[in-house]
Image (cartoon, grey):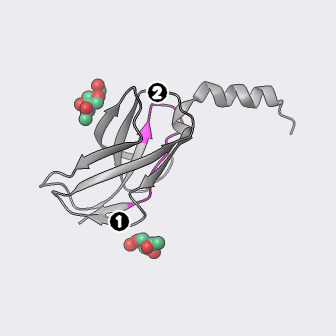
Amino acid sequence: MKLSLACVVLAAASLVSAAEFAFTEPKLNATYHPGDTVKIQWHDYDGTKPTASLWLGTGQRALHWHPYKIIANLTEPFPTSYTWSIPKNFKKQRYYLVITNQTPYQPKSDYFFVA
Ligand SMILES: *[C@@H]1O[C@H](CO)[C@@H](O)[C@H](O)[C@H]1NC(C)=O
Ligand SMILES: *[C@@H]1O[C@H](CO)[C@@H](O)[C@H](O)[C@H]1NC(C)=O
């Protein structure tokens, strides 16, 4: 298969931003409790300033992930962390975080637990 470099670059550029994030916190299998404060952190390799939402997902961390709740809408200046206070009555289960701006690239954190 022959793909021109220009096509690849254009395709990548048109999808922008969210591909350039990588979560660093929470760590895999971190366990928090309702009422805890969690510092969620990520790297922004791209440096652009998109608008995106920070979601909690449940179930399998797959392409067709299950959105549970938006915990923040992120805007300029785009942050690299967000401090989340877990509500006292929050459902105890396994979660992961997703930064999404509706493009196909939706970087996800590792699984963590509210227990
Ligand atoms: C994380 O938790 C899952 C399910 O409890 C377990 O299967 C897996 O081995 C754990 N991984 C690590 C690196 O702790
Ligand atoms: C984020 O934006 C959406 C759409 O405008 C809104 O429904 C939601 O309440 C907002 N969530 C937060 C946590 O600000």
> Magenta stretch containing residue 58, yes or no?
no
> Is 63 on the left-hand or right-hand side of 9?
left
Q: Amino acid at mark 1?
A: Ala
- Indicate the position of residue 31 as horizontal and vertical percent values: 30, 66
On residue 50, which mark appears?
2
- Indicate the position of residue 105 as horizontal and vertical percent values: 54, 38
Front-most of 110 and 61?
110
Highlighted range, magenta: 99-111
| Residue identified by numbered label 1 | 30
Dot 1 or dot 2: first in sequence order is: 1
- Indicate the position of residue 30 as horizontal and vertical percent values: 35, 65
- Indicate the position of residue 49 as horizontal and vertical percent values: 47, 27
> Magenta stretch containing residue 110, yes or no?
yes
Mark 1 crowd level (few <14, some 14–19, many ≥20, 10 Å Cα): few
Q: Amino acid at mark 2?
A: Pro
The quarter in which the C terminus is drawn is: bottom left
